[in-house]
Amino acid sequence: MASKYGEVVQESLNALLEDESFLPNFKEEERKKAFTSLESILSTPNQIQKSFLRVPLENGKVLRIPAFRVQHNNAVGPYKGGIRFHETVREDEVINLATLMTLKNTLHDVPFGGGKGGVVINPREFTEKELHTISKKYVHNFSDILGPDKDIPAPDVGTGEREMDWMMGEYKSIHPGRPYRGSFTGKSQVNGGSLGRREATGKGVYYTLRYMLHNFVNENEEWFKKNENRFAKTALNHTNRQLTVGIQGFGNVGSVAALESYTCNYLDTKVVAVSDRNVTLYNEEGLDIKALIEFTSQHEGDLPTTDEALSQSNIKAEIQDREDVLYLDTDVLILAALEEQIREDNVDKVKARMIVEGANGPVTLEADRKLSDDGVLIIPDILANAGGVIVSYFEWLQGRETQFYSEEEVFTMLFKKMKETMDNIYPQFFSDPFPLRQNCYIHSVMKLSNILYRHGKLY
C-alpha cells in the first residue's frame, strides 16, 4: 500500500534522476531500474501490523479496539515513531506518518528508521485504569516487534509520559532480563526519561522560525536583497519588524511554541490568537500566554470558552470559532493540532504569509502547492517538528549509557542538531524554485537512497 508521500518521493526522485553525480554508478537503463526500485521501497512500508485490543471496562463491558503499528523503513536504524490515542486513527494515516518519520530522521541525521502506531479511541472517554489496560494490551499484542534495537515508540497525540511509563513497565514484564530503558522514549524522568523531552517539539518548532528570520536572513541580508527567489522575498519581508502570530493547537507543542514566541528576545513576535478543540481566543494587542498556560493546567488542557472564565483569570481575549485561527490576518501561523487542517476547500481563506508545521501533515500537498505558488513560505513538518524525535534519540542514548544530561545540555544539543540541518538546507532552498518541503524531501531521499544502495537493496 503506497502512502500519500509516494507522490512526494516520486517528485524527489524525478529531480534527482538527471543529476548524474547522484548514484553515478548507474547508467541509462540500469539507472531507470534503480530509481524504480527506490520509488517502490520508499513509498511503501516494510510491515503493517494490526490488532484488536480486548479491553474490559470498569462498567463490566468488554471492547475490542483497533490498534496499529506500521514499520516503514529501518535502513538507517531501529524503527522510531509515536503512538497516538485518537478516534480518527486510520491505517492509511499511520502509514503516512511512519513514512514521514523515515524521511524526517534521515534529514536530521538521527540514526533511526520510521515507524508509527495508533489506537482508535478518544482517551477522554476512558478512566485512568482503562487507559492503563489499553497501554499494556498494546505492548502485549505488539511485543514481538518492539524493543530498544527493533522499534522504539514515543508519545504522540493523546499519549504522554504516563502511557510510556506504563508501556515500558509491561515490556519489562514480558521480557525479563533484557535491556528495557530504551524500549520507549518520552518517559518520566524517574523512569529514565530525558529532561526537556516534553518541551522539545514546541521549542524546535519556534526555533526553525527564529533561526531563519533572526540568524540566517540577517547574516545574509545583502544576498537576500539581491535574491529574486519568491521565498527569499517573503523571508526578507518578515525580518526586523514586529510579527503577529496565530497558533492552532494549545497542547504540548502549541503552548510551548506560544511561550517561546511570547518570551523571545531575538524576534519581535506578538501572539494574537491561539486555539484548541473548542475555541479560538483573539486579542490584537497580544494574549497573555503565561496566564493561558496556567488556566489550561487547571482545566484538563482546555482554553477558557466563556467571558466569565476569561474575566476570572484576568485574560483579555475575544472568543471566536475554533477554526477562525486559520483565517486571521496574521504574519505567521503555527499549526500544532492535527493533519489536513489547510486543504483545497479552505486554502483561499488563509492570509498568513509564513506557516510553520508543528503537527504532522497539517497542510495537504494540494494546498501546499497553491500557497507556495503564491509565495507563502511554509516551514514543513519534516524540518520544523523534529525536536521530539531528536530529544528521543538523546533519551535513548542516555538509557544505554546510564548517564543523563541537564536540561540546558539537552536544549543546546537540540538547537545545534537542528541548526546543522537548516545550514545544510536553507542556502539551496533560497536559491532554487522548489518549496522548502520539496527541498527537504529531496535531501532526505538522496541520503536514504545512498544508504539503500550501499546496503545492496536496489538490485
Image: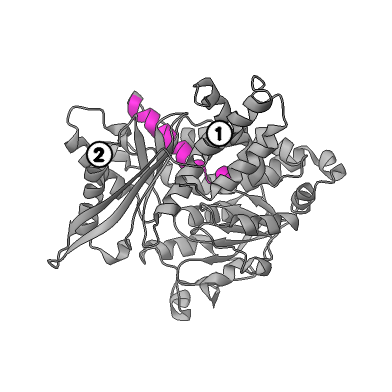
**Given the image, on which type of amino acid does mark 2 rest?**
Ser
Instruction: Note whether residue 62 is visible.
Output: yes
**Secondary structure type for disc 2:** loop
Badge 1 crowding class, 10 Å Cα cut-off, few under 14, some 14 to 19, many 20 or more, is many
Q: For the stretch drawn in magenta, what is the main secondary structure?
A: helix
Residue beneath disc 2: 143
Residue 450 position within the rendered picture, expressed as x and y whole percent measured from the top left: 57, 25
**Residue at the image position 43 percent from the left and 32 percent from the top:** 74
The relative height of residue 457 versus residue 264 in the rendered view (above or below) is above
- Examine the image and state in which quarter residue 27 appears: top right
Residue 389 highlighted magenta (yes or no): yes
Residue 258 position within the rendered picture, expressed as x and y whole percent measured from the top left: 54, 56
**Residue at the image position 31 percent from the left and 61 percent from the top:** 123
Residue 288 highlighted magenta (yes or no): no
Depth-wise, is mark 2 or mark 1 nearer the camera? 1
Checking the image for residue 38, the label placed there is 1
